[in-house]
Image (spheres, grey):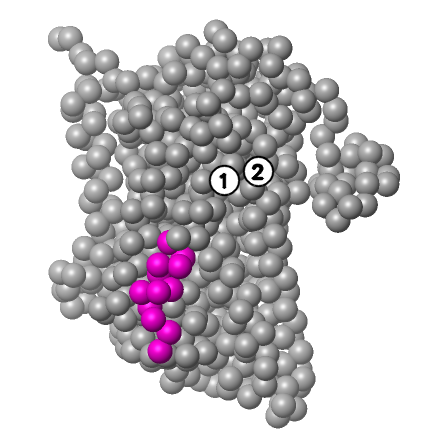
Amino acid sequence: MSTKEAPTSDAIEDARHGINGFDAQDIQKPGEVVTDNDQLQRRLENRQIQIMGVGGAIGTALFISIGGGLAKSGPLSLLLGYSIYCLILACVNNCLAEMTVLYPVPGGFIRLAGKWVDDAFGFMAGWNFFLFEALSIPFEITAINMVLSFWRDDIPTGAVCGACIAAYAILSIFGVKVYGEAEFWGSRGKITLLIMLFLFTFITMVGGNPQHDAFGFRAWRDPGPMAEYLHTGSLGRFEGLLAALWTASFTIMGPEFINLLAAEAKRPRIYIKNAFKIIYYRFFFVYILAAISVGILVAYNDPTLVLVFLTNGGGSTEAASPFILAMQNMKVAGFPHLINAPLITTIFSAGNTYMYCASRSLYGLSLDGRAPRLLKKCTNNGVPIYCVIVVMCFPLLSLLSLGNGSSQALTWLTNLITAGAIIDYIVICVTYIFFYRACQAQSVDRNTFPYLGHFQPYSAWIGLVGECLIVIFYGYSSFIPWDVSNFFTHYTMLILAPVLYFSWKIFWRTRVVRPEEADLIWERPMIDAYEAGLTSPPKGFWAEILETVGWRRGCEEQQTADSC
């Protein structure tokens, strides 16, 4: 039986001409590549990548949606849910880091999935990831409207949506160097905001509040450590723990963001490796500490918290964030306004990150023929301009909040997005298992890789099983009682994934890649040649920070001594 030939990547053909279409003699400037008009450009610096590794994926979920997890689960269950999911995602990060540092290619893991698993698998992974990132943009815009309601209820929702859409469009047409600089300062703002909130939690819990009340862990005792959700008794508390786990699965993310940055990093083998290592620290110092702080500051039965997240009555609330709610409850004058302003910029920055990821994932799809090849076109600054135009259609979904209230629109988008994120992590784990099998079948020594994932392949299997269980059961509440609308908001992406896979597989008659046939060379020689053409040593994180503030003295000595 003859089979159709699925579209293949242009990378192998490009290899004849150097790196992504560039001759070897074009690689002259340290950390930069002279490019033509239809390629991404490696212009992201070390300081930008490391800071974005910490704060790039931090947005609405950590500051607002975490309150929904607290209302449904209680402080102890929230902490347990976040801790469990951090462990699961650490296993996923372990897989993605090894593959990305070795193959920092445009499109990231979605192209790896098509290369080593099945072309149809890469098609499904790419479009699922694109939809996840694109739908996250209106989610962030809707959240901005919720946070703005803290100051005034009469701020026109449509005007806010329009302003955000216009701002994202303007930022997206600049080159990646401008984007990296914008996100560098945006991520620094997120980190500063987190430090302020953690200090606020500690100071107020030991008595540094207007009431001089050293409340400590009082909310853990009254109303208690574990809330009942959907049912009462032990079953209700267990369902509360599951609700915390579902909330964590939407809040905790980031490895896939670093994966896409790798294609535009000046020194991917060094800078990206360090960024993946930082993610492990972020799991504890950001997400777990945030779960502890929220559980200390606000009781899970707080009337405003319940109004916003359980009764969907938050469209006119003045405090969407549990941190700001705590400040209002303690009557801390001025500080809520001080926190609310950077919170808005933080959410806006997260939306800008999703704009970047959506456009780059669509670009990666076009490289392998899984999206129209017209989308491969880039500007002189390396911006996939047609991809940006397509992505700009999705922020318009934020206008849904005009008719139903920001809180309800936020709930819909959260449920749709969550399944997409989990499917991405399932794809990563499956891809790594195939990659690991191929290395074994072809006698490839993984110890020679620039980044070696430990405890493999068990780490990949733990991540795969954990994510599969979550994506299957996270929408079980739609069955008790049965709710058609709730079912489809939770499981639409889960239904769409196999439809995408089998439609592409049947049409192109693709087959699963055998371990001994997997191409483990692919674009490695091009990346090796690129890094070999760099003449100066990599810059350290603090050396680049000093340069940004105009202090260049001593930077050259620090470049080799400081590796982040």
Magenta highlight range = 154-165
Q: Residue 290, located in which quarter of the rendered image?
A: bottom right
The kind of secondary structure element at disc 1 is loop
Name the residue rendered at 51%, 80% in the picture.
Answer: 326
The kind of secondary structure element at disc 2 is helix
In the shown orientation, is residue 504 left or right of residue 127?
left
Q: Position of residue 466 (x, y in %)?
A: 39, 47
Q: Which label is found at residue 177?
A: 2
Are the residues flagged by discs 2 and 1 in contact, CB closer than 8 Å?
A: yes
Q: Position of residue 328 (x, y in %)?
A: 51, 84
Note whether 210 is above or below 20 in the view shown: below
Q: Dot 2 surroundings within 10 Å: few (below 14), some, or many (20 or more)?
A: some
Name the residue rendered at 60%, 70% in the picture.
Answer: 197
Q: In what quadrant of the picture does the N terminus appear?
A: top left
What amino acid is found at the position of numbered circle 1 in the picture? Phe
Q: Position of residue 485 (x, y in %)?
A: 16, 61
Where is mark 1, residue-wise?
174
What amino acid is found at the position of numbered circle 2 in the picture? Lys
Q: Taken as a whole, is the magenta stretch helix, strand or loop?
A: helix
Q: In what quadrant of the picture does the C terminus appear?
A: top right
Note whether 218 is above or below 167 in the view shown: below
In the shown orientation, is residue 248 left or right of residue 420?
right
Q: Residue 319, located in which quarter of the rendered image?
A: bottom left
